[in-house]
Image: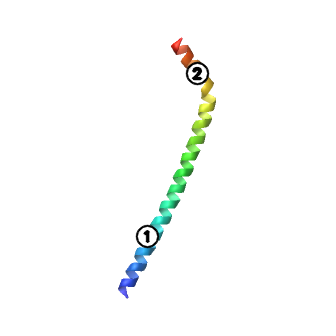
Amino acid sequence: TANSTVWQAVSAIFIVLVVHKIWTLQRALKCVSYVHIIFSTCDFFAGPFTRNTSREVSG
């Protein structure tokens, strides 16, 4: 019947949307963790430099 076809279409779209959401979230989380790693690395290398600079500025 037409009704069951509609339901199949709706459920298919719903599944696609959910999968897409999960996939996008995973990608977003991966990007966030990459950014966090990059920032931590930059912080690690820039730490002594920024400390020296701030010391010069305050002194």
The residue at which mark 1 appears reads as: 14
Q: Quadrant of the C terminus?
A: top right
Which residue is drawn at the image coordinates 58% and 45% (left, top)? Answer: 34
Q: Amino acid at mark 2?
A: Arg
Is residue 55 placed above or below 17 in the rendered structure?
above
Location of residue 25 with respect to 56 vertically, above or below:
below
Mark 1 neighbour density, 10 Å: few (under 14) some (14–19) many (20 or more): few
Q: Is disc 2 surrounded by few (<14), some (14 to 19) or many (20+) residues within 10 Å?
A: few
Q: Is residue 23 above or below residue 6?
A: above
Pinpoint residue 52: horizontal percent, then vertical percent: 59, 19
Q: Amino acid at mark 1?
A: Phe
Farthest residue, direction top:
59
Q: CA distance from mark 2 to mark 1?
A: 52 Å
On the image, the x and y values in percent for residue 2 come to 36, 85
**Residue at numbered disc 2:** 51
Q: Quadrant of residue 56?
A: top right
Mark 2 and 1 residues: CB-CB less than 8 Å, in contact? no
